Image (tube, helix red, strand yellow):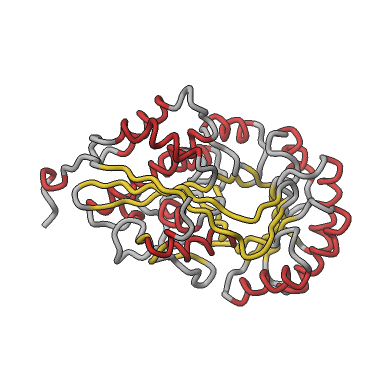
């Protein structure tokens, strides 16, 4: 028998915020940045004897926004009315750094509230979000520019051995050496695996056009992510118009607010749009981006954070794939029980577990606490 509405009434009682800094397993870099650790800001939302988990990847400053501003707004809210809480948080962040740190703070709380709602209803999050798909195709992502060629080949071929039929590597830091690096990658993964490249906006328009042709014609690369800066919408449109047939131009991972995605789509800048739940103000924001894509008959690809994306991606009708990013996949296995592993090139949400199916391994996490 379905639960009576009065049995489900629950106000948000507490919002706990913590941050953890996890060293990488090897120095990492892309076309424009270098790093040796990943920081996660975690939110635990409590109501009705249940706890929802949500997070963002980024500065601990997002945690400060939550504790100083958002927590007071959310406590006492009806735990089943996530959109109402989201609207209140957006209004409160108007003068605090939205987009940016404020948007990421909203994302961490919003994802925790959606997870909490699903747990109160004792349903998997994908079901609560009205899943359109049973599983989420993934692509292996890493191939950092700091990797020696043998490590690059080992990582990419390892994903292929796991049954993932598409992989992505970083390019753009040393463009003249990238041709050899991409050759190493193609030889490692064989002829049947899709090969993606990501310049993180490191190239000029002329460079990007040149390398797009080389990567496509010589190595059958079919995805070029941020060949130029994602702020250069004209440049992205130029690449989309002139890239070799069969090569998609992608961008969008740095979007925080809906108008950013609207401008990118209006410019015709991408073949496939990207969005990141941990940046675009949570699951609520992500599903609104998906609606923009559906209105334009364009597919959406999710950026990074496989565990935070698996359930909401099932609810996106025009969905392409999810980035199975090395750093985040590794971190999530370290911090959470219930993390999904790719099967046949996809993540399959566990419909036997409520919410996102994750539980914090508190003792393991504590040694990384900030």
Residue drawn at 76 percent across, 52 percent down: 245
Q: Residue furthest top?
A: 95
Confirm whether residue 96 shows in the render. yes
In the image, 160 versus 305, the foreground residue is 305
- Relative to 288, is 332 above or below? below
Left or right, 281 with respect to 7, comes to right
- Relative to 115, is 264 above or below? above
Residue 187 lies in quadrant: bottom right
Q: Quarter of the image for the N terminus: give it.
A: bottom left
Residue drawn at 69 percent across, 60 percent down: 27
Residue drawn at 38 percent across, 64 percent down: 363
Question: Residue 30: image x %, image y %?
Answer: 72, 52
Question: Residue 52: image x %, image y %?
Answer: 32, 51
- Callout count: 0
Left or right, 93 with respect to 147, comes to left
In the image, 207 versus 330, the foreground residue is 330
Residue 326 lies in quadrant: bottom right
- Relative to 68, is 53 above or below? below
Residue drawn at 55 percent across, 53 percent down: 304
- Relative to 351, is 90 above or below? above
Q: Residue furthest bottom?
A: 161
In the image, 303 versus 66, the foreground residue is 66
Residue 262 lies in quadrant: top right
Question: Residue 252: image x %, image y %?
Answer: 61, 42
Confirm whether residue 294 shows in the render. no
Question: Residue 241: image x %, image y %?
Answer: 76, 41
């Amino acid at each position: 028998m379905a639960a009576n509405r009065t049995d489900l009434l629950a106000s948000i009682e507490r919002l706990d915020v913590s941050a953890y800094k996890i060293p990488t397993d090897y120095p990492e870099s892309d076309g424009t940045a270098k790093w040796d650790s990943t920081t996660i800001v975690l939110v635990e939302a409590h109501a009705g004897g249940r706890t929802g988990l949500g997070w963002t990847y980024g500065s601990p400053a997002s945690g400060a926004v939550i504790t100083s501003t958002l927590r007071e707004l959310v406590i006492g809210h009806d735990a089943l009315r996530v959109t109402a809480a989201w609207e209140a948080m957006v209004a409160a962040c108007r003068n605090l750094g939205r987009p940016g740190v404020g948007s990421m703070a909203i994302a961490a709380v919003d994802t925790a509230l959606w997870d909490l709602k699903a747990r109160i209803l004792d349903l998997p999050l994908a079901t609560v979000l009205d899943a359109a798909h049973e599983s989420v195709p993934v692509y292996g992502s890493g191939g950092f520019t700091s990797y020696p060629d043998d490590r690059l080949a080992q990582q990419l071929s390892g994903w292929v051995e796991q049954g993932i039929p598409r992989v992505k590597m970083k390019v753009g830091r040393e463009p003249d050496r990238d041709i050899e690096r991409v050759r190493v990658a193609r030889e490692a993964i064989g002829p049947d695996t899709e090969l993606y490249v990501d310049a993180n906006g490191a190239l000029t328009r002329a460079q990007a056009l040149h390398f797009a042709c080389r990567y496509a014609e010589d190595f059958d690369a079919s995805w070029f992510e941020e060949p130029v800066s994602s702020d250069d919408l004209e440049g992205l449109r130029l690449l989309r118009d002139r890239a070799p047939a069969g090569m998609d131009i992608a961008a969008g991972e740095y979007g925080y607010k809906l108008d950013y995605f609207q401008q990118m789509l209006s410019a015709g800048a991408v073949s496939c749009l990207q969005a990141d739940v941990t940046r675009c103000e949570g699951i609520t924001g992500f599903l609104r981006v998906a609606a923009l894509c559906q209105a334009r008959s364009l597919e959406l690809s999710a950026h990074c954070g496989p565990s935070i994306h698996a359930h909401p991606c099932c609810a996106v009708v025009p969905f392409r794939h999810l980035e199975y990013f090395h750093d985040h996949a590794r971190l999530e296995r370290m911090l959470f029980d219930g993390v999904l592993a790719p099967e046949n090139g996809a993540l399959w949400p566990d419909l036997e577990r409520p919410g996102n199916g994750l539980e914090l391994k508190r003792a393991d996490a504590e040694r990384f606490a900030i």
